[in-house]
Amino acid sequence: MIKISVNRIRPLRLTALFSVMLCMLPGVGLAAAQMESESLDLVTQACQDHQQGNNNIQLPFRDIESEISPVRYNGNRVGQRYFYALRNNNSVRFDVLQPAGQPVRFVLELRMEDRPSLFIGMDQDCTVREARRIVYKNGRAIKLELLDKNLNHLSDELLNPEPVEPDSAVADSAIAVAMVDSGVNYLLPEINRKLARDSNNQILGYDFWEMDARPFDVHSAGSPFFVQRHGTRTASLMLREGGEVRLVSYRYPRPDMQRMSQLIEHADSLGVRIIGLPLGSNRKEDWVTFLEAAEDRPHILFIASAGNNGRDIDAEPVYPASMDLENMLVVTSADDSVRPAERTNWGKRSVDYLLPAERQKVIRFSGEQGLASGSSYAVSRMVALAANLLNISPDMDTAQLQAAIKARSITPVETRWVRIGYIPDPLKVEEAPDFDLVASEMMKQYQSPQYSLSLNLVQLDSRWKKELVLEAVEGANKILRQCQLSIGAVDFYMMSARDYLQDLETGSAHTILQEFRTLFPESRGIEIMFTRESRMEIVFEAEAFGEGNTATRPWLQDSVWIAYGARDLPVTIAHELFHVLSNTGGHAPSPQNLMSAESSLENTELTPAQCSLAKSYFARDDSNSGQ
């Protein structure tokens, strides 16, 4: 966090320019463009005054309201604000800001007819770094114009466009699912074709912020000049995973949260069974009408975000997540170790489930692909899971749907985070396997010394060729034999898996390993999974899981995962197997040692102490020996 100081701010002499602006106000001959030009002159002159050290500030107006006040951030004074209420509902707000140890910054906001109109941000060198104009039509903000340093138009950001007809439409029989967020970019074909529509092809969602039928993705709570786009990302993830659904998109009613009851009534009238709430606040009073409306509709399942404040919401509530509502599930995002991800909230009483929701593939407002993380995306994944379950059994009521969701969870080893459990793989819906055997072959067992290790080689990405893998295993065997360790029986399995199961990720690995071990209950030893890539937070070409790093994710124990394209494959296999055998993630300083952090084909040496450590694997459980 940046600490702010105002010790070096010099007062400014603005009398002359403001006097000129007063004489040329709209209503007495000044056009909007002239008003903007004078605003630019004001910022420029203020910057020049600062450079020259002028410090004699006087309020220039006697017949209008004016005010000077400090600017504060987190309780600290960060600058000085000059506010001038002009005639005809126009006003100027001018801030002089200076972060500690950084140059001064000048910010002007012009309001015309009591509406935000122009923003200018200038650095200490008197160069405009940011300028934006809001354009209105029939009293509604329709676009944000990005301007150059001379206030000339560069590009637009749309704020309230008219919906367009889709190139294709989702079936009317698809389950209606609502997402309450900042709206969606319904101009994107991927979103537009999934929107619920009426018989006249009009979208059925609604903007309860501006009270119109255009729930466009705009979140302007911080500043109307710098809008955030959130709803497109959360909706795109839900649509990608949710199968055949019709999206009813809502823009939440920030100006009047009492409208949440109207929103729920509107969704109910459309037959919505699931409502996602990837939002929340600290103000309980904002959610009173929501609670009442939701309690009156037990046939709707609400799925709420636990929030992203990095806190226990049992002790410091977030709403609506902390409300007691039988037909609401509260979710948070899990990290790779099945704990709440960094900055996400938890609560043994208030939060129901952990879901893997970090680095999820989403569509940004621009239409570009991206990654997103946090509790909001846990909502998206849970909504999609609930929708998929309803598609299988449409007659389930809310209680049965909640039971079906619970059946797909496991109890995490650390139970202090959530009330119910962890859903490792929200895409795992049906009991039928997602993971099929294409071919398998038992390879000839190597001649074994005292300590013999069985391996199950599992090809998930078809680009891994059996001959290459087996040749690399032979090379790894030669390296390990210096410790009187040997690879014994080797089985090779070619598997056909759903696309997302071809990667390493903590949650989806549960599905892969569980199904593999179900298909081959007699298989023993260590699984080496030859994957497409890693989707872990910290990405390695290869990763090993022993007893020590799987306490919170036991299904991963005794497995090695190698991404396609991994270098120095014989050394890599031996290196990762040694991690499992020795039950340590440490590396050796010697560049010739097998356990050097930097791999090469020359890294093959092991010390007697390392060999002794690796042999302790067999002492832990004789069944691991493969003999």
Image: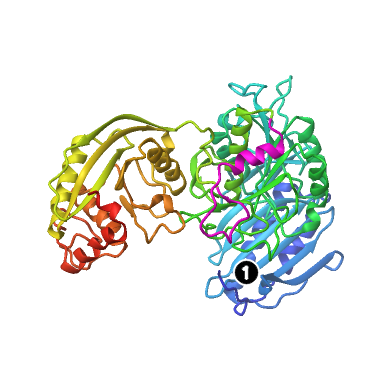
Q: Is residue 364 left or right of residue 596?
A: right
550 in magenta: no
**Residue 204 visible somewhere in the drawing:** yes
Tell me where residue 407 appears, x and y as whole percent.
Answer: 58, 42
| Residue identified by numbered label 1 | 97
The residue lying toward the viewer, choosing from 181 and 592, is 592
**Residue 158 visible somewhere in the drawing:** no
Name the residue: 62% across, 22% down. Answer: 169
In the rendered image, the residue lying farthest to the bottom is 7
Give the extent of the magenta segment: 396-422
Dot 1 lies on which element? strand
The residue lying toward the viewer, choosing from 537 and 620, is 620
The residue lying toward the viewer, choosing from 89 and 315, is 315
Q: Picture quarter containing residue 6?
A: bottom right
405 in magenta: yes
- How packed mark 1 is, by other alpha carbons closer than 10 Å (few <14, some 14-19, many 20 or more), is many
Name the residue: 78% across, 58% down. Answer: 284
Q: Picture quarter containing residue 273?
A: top right
Give the residue type that dot 1 points to.
Leu
Tell me where residue 480 appears, x and y as whole percent.
Answer: 17, 55
